[in-house]
Image (cartoon, rainbow, N blue to C red):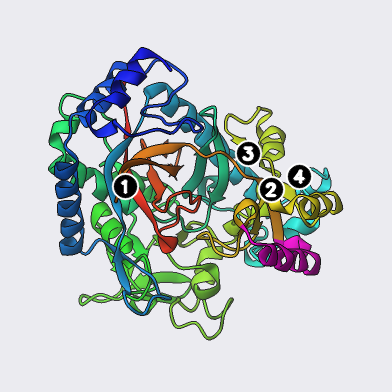
Amino acid sequence: MNDMKMAAQAAGLFATYDVPDFFCELLNRRDIPPPGLQLVRERLARFDLAELRRRAAAVEAQFYRLGITFTVYSDREAIDRVLPFDVIPRVLTAAEWDHVERGVQQRVQAINLFLHDIYHDRHILRDNVVPADLVLGNSNYCQAMVGLDVPGGVYVHINGTDLVRDRDGRFLVLEDNARTPSGVSYVLEDRQMMLRLMPDLATGLDIRPVDEYGPRLHRALAEVAPTGVADPQVVLLSPGIYNAAYFEHVFLAREMGIPLVEGRDLMVEDGRVYMRTVGGPRPVHSIYRRLNDDFLDPLVFNPDSLLGVPGLVDAYRRGNVTLANALGTGVADDKAVYAYMPRIIRYYLDQEPILTNVETHICGEPEGLAYTLANLEHLVVKPVGESGGYGLLIGPHATQAQLDEFRTLLRADPANYISQPVISLSVSPTLCPAGVEGRHVDLRPFAVTGRDTWVLPGGLSRVALRKGSLVVNSSQGGGAKDTWVLAS
């Protein structure tokens, strides 16, 4: 342990902080920290624990007042919850962020090429780089997209790539979110809250801003509007107030300066989409939809859906409106397809992946199933269609009964699962009931693609608040941190 780290840990807030077996970006790095990061930890070390708790309580009260919540439908006691927020920021260096940014841009480019290919000539399937049945038999594969050319070849306009760091501090891709990734509103609100209530921590630091997201997203959605439209009308389509992420829908519509609409606010006439207004129908050209494919158009998907817009897919196929993200993008963030992403990047870009995957075993393949069954107690097993941390097994933390149950599930439907080794996830100092302790974190950078791809500096850092837990999802007790990217 170097002298600098010993001094930081011995002082004040970090006097009892000790995570010898994990990579900690703030206090247990493998390199000499840059001056900005060193300044952050020195300032934090001088904080009094009681004062930090007081500020944390002030943050929570502010979030309640502002209505910054998410919804948990399974909890009858508290439907609307404030996302737990930790006042100790996560700090990334400029070099670390450059690596993440280039890797995310590469991945988004490959995903868009992959989606265009599988809905057109299917070269990657014919060349047996990705199994055809894994794509064409995928529940997210959308027949309505076959042969359809989307503006600029952009299928995934908003992408969230979930990253973790291992024991050596390497960034690894955990999964892609290419349908309707959520959480960016917390990134922007968390930053505002930190600057308001922890100004003494940020003063004088060159931290990359995050307030460009709304204008950048609006510009990208306007860039991919149908050709020939001088001033595109962009709207955000929400399922409505009962959706878990409704706060984010309201927030993003306000940030972009566009109308927030529900399905009943839109109509299709002669293959064109219009928004109902008090002044009469108004043309709509780009729709940022926060509605899953199945509910988008009852004439094409679920006929019982009251959330969508009848005729919307027809207008889309005619090229009269752009949907962001495009239909059928769920194929690209399927957890089984994820295992092939390194090959997909090499196939389309002739490049090595900048961000590598976590080692993944596909249980739908005989070798993958055999390996998973033989090593179940050492692996994380995930259903390919679930999100939010549901339905997974963490082998080292499972009981014998849970292991036996999962073996039965695997044998009954092996194609529904993948397995991965348990990664020694990095930790970040977190304010806990007993003081400041290390808690596991991940990172979701958000990429916005129009004519090019821009990545929001930082992204959503989610933290597993329960000691020893690897599950960071808000629906299962996780919280969030502000992510600071040092500009130099």
Image height of 9 relative to 330, above or below: above
Q: Nearer the viewer, residue 401 or 421?
A: 401
Number of other residues with Cα within 10 Å of mark 3, as a class: few under 14, some 14 to 19, many 20 or more:
some
Residue 226 at x, y percent in the picture: 45, 54
Cα distance in 3D space between marks 3 and 4: 20 Å
Q: Earlier in the sequence, mark 3 or mark 1?
A: 1
Q: Using the rendered view, name the quadrant where residue 431 is placed.
A: top left
Please tell me whether residue 405 belongs to the stretch shown in magenta: yes
Of the residues shown, which amino acid type is indicated by label 1? Val
Mark 4 and 2 residues: CB-CB less than 8 Å, in contact?
A: no
Of the residues shown, which amino acid type is indicated by label 4? Ile
The answer to whether 56 appears left or right of 269 in the picture is left
Of the residues shown, which amino acid type is indicated by label 2? His
Of tags 4 and 2, the one toward the viewer is 2
Cα distance in 3D space between marks 4 and 1: 36 Å
Q: Nearer the viewer, residue 376 or 313?
A: 376
The answer to whether 468 appears left or right of 436 in the picture is right
Q: Which residue is mark 4?
A: 124
- Is any atom of residue 407 visible in this view? yes
Q: Which residue is mark 1?
A: 187
Residue 443 at x, y percent in the picture: 44, 42
Q: Which residue is mark 2?
A: 378
